[in-house]
Image (cartoon, rainbow, N blue to C red):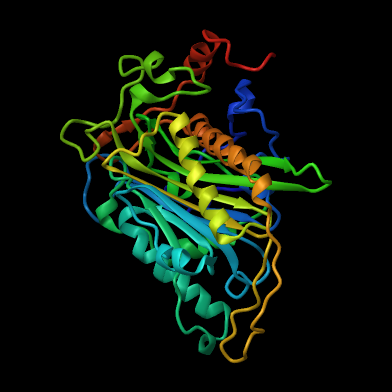
Amino acid sequence: MRRTSLLDNAHSSEGDTVRARDLRITIGTGDPGPLNSTTDVPGVRVGHCTLVEGYGALVRGRGPVRTGVTVVLPHDDGVWSSQLFAGCHSLNGNGEMTGLAWIRECGTLTSPIGLTNTHSLGVVRDALIEFEVEQRDSADVYWGLPVVAETWDGLLNDCNGFHVRPEHLYAAIADAGTGPVTEGNVGSGTGMVCHGFKGGIGTASRVIDDGFGATYTLGVLVQANHGARRRFAVNGAPVGLAVDHSAVPCPASPESALGSEGAGSVIVVVATDAPLLPHQCQRLAQRAGLGVARTGGAGEHASGDLFLAFATGNRLVARDYGSRPPPVRSLRMMSEAFIDPFFYAAVEATEEAIVNALVAAETMTGRDEVTAYALPHDLLVNALDKHGLRSPG
């Protein structure tokens, strides 16, 4: 998908994005979907609005701006009125994802999912409610509890300048499509840093065969803004030790809020078309944490690591308070005896999505000339080749 910007002088890079598999880095043993993306799940759409403006010293309210909005539309059949089962998990709660209290209580997702920076979360949440009111008869909208998640981009962005506005959420929704998802410095991932390298948005997917003639797809989208350099690993190789601070400097300084390595946050959104119930979605969300751990994330004290999983295999009747829905509903569920392949898929796709975010990201200079350097592909490849951890050419 294209990168959308509503600010003058916005920067976007052109050309094909490089991903882990382009470098012969294969994560796990599962098979990816056609796009190796969360949009492989039928009906799921992803859109971005990227905001980049200004250079030099920070002037609060003026920039430099390195931020944006990303939105995940969970299906294309009345997203506000056709509910899906969902579950969530917090590896460490030094962050925010709105709407989780209702998901834990009722097990349903009733909105698109927004992603942005920490201090713009409220704006995007309110804009999603406004969008719902506009899309439906406002008399039918008694309340809205949309899901919006954040990570902090203040190393590169004027996060206290409140540059994200409602129209940027609308732009991300207008950009949403079922094609390839742009990764790296895009949308809400624009100003993010991961394991001391430039981070951002990443995605991956897996196809699951139940052995009885049915196949399902699981997709993951991450906003990667977490992790200590020394712990960073790919396929088990200690890449962070091989590509240390002397090879590629970290953007954090001792006096910064991210001066302690490992501080930051990661958001993981897991989608599947399988008929999972809420407790199964919650278990799936929990497994995303294992994918984060495989790349070296540890849920540090100063990291907000929040995960959401939803399943489109069951659709609840329209949310209509003007009529009485039937008291009993017929549902399908995946047998617990066949749930492990979904767990493995969530772990692998989360790990690969984080690596894709790092491989796709480009070096970016932000406020006060702070620079987050991209993970050099040649150094990454060399580190893996020393351990024989790339696929044959």
Residue appearing at x 64%, y 46% in the figure: 339
**Is residue 23 shown above or below 297?**
above
Which residue is nearer to you in this view: 128 or 14? 128
Q: Position of residue 137 (x, y in %)?
A: 56, 86
**Extreme residue in the right direction:** 213
**Extreme residue in the front direction:** 337
Figure disc tally: 0
Residue appearing at x 52%, y 7% in the figure: 386
**Can residue 53 be seen at all in this image of the molecule?**
yes
Q: Which image quadrant for residue 296?
A: top left
Q: Position of residue 77 (x, y in %)?
A: 68, 69
**Along the horizontal axis of the image, is 187 left or right of 21?**
left
Residue appearing at x 38%, y 53% in the figure: 150
**Extreme residue in the bottom direction:** 322
Which residue is nearer to you in this view: 105 or 36? 105
**Is residue 307 shown above or below 209?**
below
Q: Which image quadrant for residue 258?
A: top left
**Along the horizontal axis of the image, is 192 left or right of 275?**
left
Q: Position of residue 116 (x, y in %)?
A: 41, 54
Which residue is nearer to you in this view: 270 or 331? 331
Q: Position of residue 272 (x, y in %)?
A: 64, 52
**Can residue 204 be seen at all in this image of the molecule?**
no
